[in-house]
Amino acid sequence: MSEDKDIEEALEKLRNDDRVTFNEDGTKTVRLEYPVKYNNKDIEELTFRRPRGADWRNTDREDGGIGIAFMMAAALTGYPLSVFDNMDGEDALVCSAVAGTMGKKSKIGGTS
């Protein structure tokens, strides 16, 4: 029950964050405050697709934490972990929150 409450609170914070867009197709887009370079290009936003079963299996670790959130973020955006390692800390926290809520049921607005 506590996990459900935590998810609801996280989703509510993301809904109120003007950097995060909840797209109609179930994806979420994060506009980065500080673009990060990848392959000589500035990445200004990341779109997180809905997770698949393999994404959950590949990130199912007991240690949890931000490393797992980054692994999920990398899987859902298609970018390597190095993008998240080199990201501004505040942007990284928003991305990890988005990754942590993808595919979770929300009492308000259905699946996120």
Image (cartoon, rainbow, N blue to C red):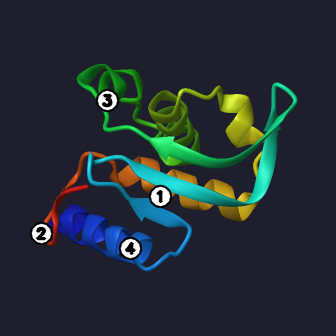
Which residue is drawn at the image coordinates 53% and 75% (left, top)?
18
Between discs 4 and 1, the one toward the N terminus: 4
Q: Which comes before the other along the chain, label 2 or label 4?
A: 4
Query: In the displayed structure, does residue 41 sit left or right of residue 83?
Result: right
Kind of residue sitting beneath label 1 = Ala
The image quarter in which residue 12 lies: bottom left
- Asked where in the image residue 8 lies, by quadrant, the reply is bottom left
> Residue at 51% across / 39% down in the picture?
73
Q: Secondary structure at mark 4?
A: helix
Looking at the rendered structure, which numbered label has been put on residue 15?
4
Say which amino acid is labelled 2: Lys
Q: Position of residue 50 (x, y in %)?
A: 31, 38
- Distance between mark 4 and mark 3 Cα atoms: 23 Å
Q: Decide: is 60 above or below 44.
A: above
Q: CA distance from mark 2 to mark 4?
A: 13 Å
Q: Nearer the viewer, mark 4 or mark 1?
A: 4
Residue that mark 1 sits on: 97
Quarter of the picture containing the N terminus is: bottom left
Indicate the position of residue 14 as horizontal and vertical percent values: 43, 70
- Crowd rating for badge 4 (residues with CA inside 10 Å; few <14, some 14–19, many 20+): few
Which tag, 3 or 1, sits closer to the chain's start? 3
Residue designated by label 3 = 56
Contact between marks 2 and 4 (CB within 8 A): the answer is no
User: Is residue 93 placed above or below 12 in the rendered structure?
Assistant: above
Q: Does the residue at mark 4 contact the one at mark 1 (Cβ under 8 Å)?
A: no
Task: Identify the residue position indicated by label 2 in the image.
Answer: 107
Kindly report which numbered mark, 2 or 3, lies closer to the viewer in this rendering.
Answer: 2
- How many angstroms separate mark 3 from mark 1 (CA)? 15 Å
Instruction: Tell me the quarter of the image containing the C terminus.
Output: bottom left
- In terms of sequence position, does the residue under pointer 2 or pointer 1 come before the other? 1
Which is in the foreground here, disc 2 or disc 4? 4
